[in-house]
Image (spheres, rainbow, N blue to C red):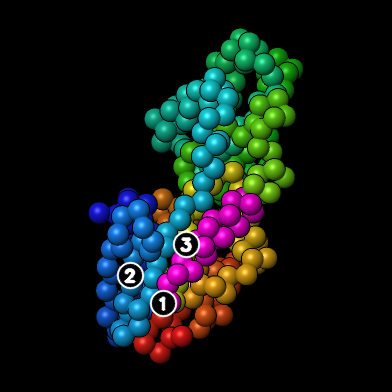
């Protein structure tokens, strides 16, 4: 039995394939657990190996416990109000003591801002002012993942330039890791990436992808969004000129492929 994220990626790519190559059979076979590849894929007479990887920053989950709890309370309120639509990044510029003292007012302003911007895909960075003090800032960064996250505390967090650099590093590391993993296999390789790094927009990863040599893989496919709201973007295919900035049609992966 494969992991839930692997099955999710498989289902998105399978749906993507069946929309354009219905004339050929598509057969998936699970790989061995904890060993590459995650799947074997047969399209017509052509066989491929498929690896799934998720782009996320696990270390971010350990940051700033108290501030994360405050952020989680904000998310709980807007989720309960059904006004959370997209990713909101909070950055705090004052001490815990000050935030605690004005916590109710800060939360109200944040909840109001999230409700007022639920229809927007992104916003500029906005300061939350209470009693003349800039207590924190908030920015909506994307529309497809519904979450309120902690972006920084007193200048030590993941600010925009750092987030872009980290996104580039994470992407390169994941791709390098999968190249090493799949090198022993002779079949054409397909890499399925799941974007779960909400500190940057999907466009940032697309720009990074332009600077990376992906020719080791037959195809590289990025999955953006949750299970209900998801989008597949073809970054690269050996027999298709893919545009990493747009949703692409499925590559010609059948028996005539390389």
Question: Residue lying farthest bottom?
Answer: 256
Give the residue at x 68% y 49%: 165
Q: Which quadrant does the N terminus fall into?
A: bottom left
Q: CA distance from mark 2 to mark 1?
A: 9 Å
State the residue position of label 1.
187
Q: Is residue 227 magenta?
A: no
Label ID, residue 181: 3
Q: CA distance from mark 3 to mark 2?
A: 14 Å
Q: How busy is the neighbourhood of tag 2: few (under 14 within 10 Å), some, or many (20 plus)?
A: some
Q: How busy is the neighbourhood of tag 3: few (under 14 within 10 Å), some, or many (20 plus)?
A: some
For the record, the magenta segment spans 167-186
Q: Residue 127 occupies which quadrant of the picture?
A: top right
Does the image show residue 40?
yes
Quick one: label 3 or label 1, which is nearer the N terminus? 3
How many numbered dots are placed on residues in this image? Answer: 3
Q: Is residue 221 left or right of residue 209?
A: left
Q: Are marks 2 and 1 in contact (CB under 8 Å)?
A: yes
Image location (x, y in percent) of residue 12: 37, 62
Q: Is residue 25 left or right of residue 210?
A: left
Instruction: Label 3: state its secondary structure.
Output: helix
Image location (x, y in percent) of residue 213: 62, 70
Give the residue at x 59% y 36%: 89
Q: Are marks 3 and 2 in contact (CB under 8 Å)?
A: no
Image location (x, y in percent) of residue 147: 48, 38
Above or below, comparing residue 195 to residue 76 in the picture: below
Above or below, comparing residue 86 to residue 19 in the picture: above
Q: Is residue 184 magenta?
A: yes
Give the residue at x 72% y 29%: 155
Q: How busy is the neighbourhood of tag 1: few (under 14 within 10 Å), some, or many (20 plus)?
A: some
Quick one: label 2 or label 1, which is nearer the N terminus? 2
Label ID, residue 221: none
Label ID, residue 40: 2
């Amino acid at each position: 039995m494969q992991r839930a994220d692997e099955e999710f990626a498989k289902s998105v790519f399978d749906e993507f394939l069946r929309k354009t190559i219905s004339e050929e059979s598509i057969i998936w076979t699970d790989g061995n657990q904890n060993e590459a590849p995650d799947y074997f894929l047969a399209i017509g007479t052509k066989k491929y190996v498929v690896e799934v990887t998720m782009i996320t920053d696990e270390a971010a989950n350990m940051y700033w416990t108290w501030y994360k709890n405050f952020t989680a309370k904000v998310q709980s309120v807007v989720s309960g109000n059904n006004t959370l639509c997209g990713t909101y990044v909070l950055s705090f510029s004052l001490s815990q003591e000050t935030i605690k003292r004005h916590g109710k007012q800060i939360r109200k302003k944040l909840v109001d801002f999230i409700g007022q911007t639920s229809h927007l895909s992104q916003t500029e960075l906005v300061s939350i002012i209470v009693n003349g003090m800039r207590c924190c800032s908030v920015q909506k960064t994307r529309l497809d993942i519904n979450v309120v996250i902690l972006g920084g505390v007193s200048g030590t967090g993941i600010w925009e330039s750092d987030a872009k650099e980290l996104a580039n590093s994470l992407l390169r590391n994941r791709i390098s890791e999968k190249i090493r993993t799949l090198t022993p296999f002779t079949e054409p390789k397909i890499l399925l990436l799941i974007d779960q790094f909400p500190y940057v927009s999907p466009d940032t990863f697309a720009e990074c992808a332009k600077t990376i040599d992906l020719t080791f893989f037959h195809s590289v496919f990025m999955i953006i969004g949750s299970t209900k709201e998801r989008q597949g973007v073809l970054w690269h295919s050996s027999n298709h000129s893919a545009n990493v900035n747009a949703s692409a049609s499925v590559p010609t992966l059948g028996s005539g492929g390389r």
